[in-house]
Amino acid sequence: MRILALIFNRISAFFGLDWHMKEVLSGAFVAFTFKVLGAGLGFAFNVLLARLLGAERAGLYYLAFTVITIATVVGRMGLDNALLRFTATNAVQEKWEKVSGVYRKGIFIAVIASLVATIIVGSSASWVAKGIFSEPALVKPIRLMALAILPISLLTLHAELLKGLKRIRDAMLVQGVGVPLISISLLAFLGGPFQVTGAVTAYVCATTIVLLLSVALWRRATPKLRGVRGTFDTRLLLATSMPLLLVASMNLIMSWTDTIMLGFWIDSKSVGIYNIAMRAAMLTSFILFAVNSIVAPKFAALYAKGELEALGIVARNSTALMTVLALPILLLFILSPKFILGIFGPGFISGSNVLIILALGQFVNVATGSVGYLLMMTGYEKLMRNNIIGSAILNIILNTLLVPKYGITGAAIATAVSLAIMNLVSAGLVYWKLSIITLPIPKGAYIRAK
């Protein structure tokens, strides 16, 4: 930690950062450390899963995981970003009764929605497995994985609430480290003898344990809420969360259309190879998720206080920082894709081109900055909704055209192109509404554009 503090002080002095950016950089170091740890654990989990199950059985696991991921979006009801926004804006003004009210109402809505989603997924598992994917062996993994819908939804909301209070370490522990750490420990014992069922059981148990941890961390972070019931306008909460639910739903389509179509048109082995390459490519943008955890509540607070100039400086400087850190990872994937995928096993090397294509798409995601959060934290969530709807439609069209003919390479092209377009359009929307250029261009060019 002393080394990190020294690096932070040197960078701050060199660039002459203001206190807003110093806070972002300080929080980003914490988030980055936990994100690296979480990414390493996630990488290790995927390696162990691939080696224990092989490409075909790993494909069954990822198909079940895809179904559950879709269900958790319904379980969260778009409340993750809404709770983050309202917690951040009310906490900075010390309106603790509002924080208490938004917490109680948000969690109550999420519990009801998650239970409904669990029942629907459990009862429709046979139809999904046999009717959509033509995989009878997928029925049991889907039904078992459905038990994770409630804990995933609630632990995610608690992580966003903690971010709203600037408890970045606790939030990253819940959202980035806890689940893969416990999952990999359980998978080592359950994956071998019980195969796919063991892997799913490991994940369900991990999410349940981390949910309990997230509740404990929230209670420790909010002593001022003890005995305060508080109130919050339900209509305002839902009016904010519903557009964000659609954003999350479309984002989910962007993330999982490729996997679903590969499972429908190709086979579970291709799904396994593709998902391993995709998870490796995500390392290109993990710095974005680390920085987002600290800049999102800061965006909301600065906008609420009318400090638009400071908002622009934070957005631009954070983008430049992320781009510099992501570039070496991108180069590694471009130059040595077979080596990276060979770590998972020789059966995954055929996904080398997929890794390169997806990594390029993720790099554009990083180089445009935290544009999605800029729009959602400043009240322009409907613009983000419209953008992502168009991008999701494009993603579906491209996957429909390319997957049947080109398989996993076609899926990678469709996903990377639609992701890049979505982020570039978001950057344009940020400039249109907030007059902020997030792209890491030279300062002179920014001044001329402005």
Image (cartoon, rainbow, N blue to C red):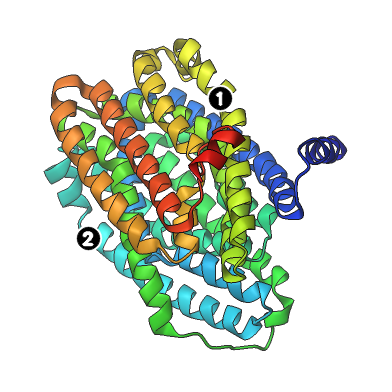
Q: In the image, what residue occupies the spot 34% across and 13% down? A: 350
Total marks placed: 2
Q: Nearer the viewer, residue 248 or 302?
A: 302
Question: Quadrant location of the N terminus?
Answer: top right
Q: In the image, what residue occupies the spot 51% across and 46% down? A: 450
405 relative to 383, above or below: above
Residue 257: image x %, image y %? 25, 41
69 relative to 236, above or below: above
Query: Which residue has dot 1 on it?
Result: 327
The kind of secondary structure element at disc 1 is: helix
Label 1 Cα crowd, 10 Å radius (few <14 / some 14-19 / many 20+) = some
Q: Nearer the viewer, residue 43 or 96?
A: 96
- Amino acid marked by disc 1: Leu
311 relative to 424, above or below: below
Residue 123's disc number: 2
Residue at the far front in the pictured view: 448
Q: In the image, what residue occupies the spot 24% across and 39% down? A: 395
Q: In the image, what residue occupies the spot 26% across and 52% down? A: 389
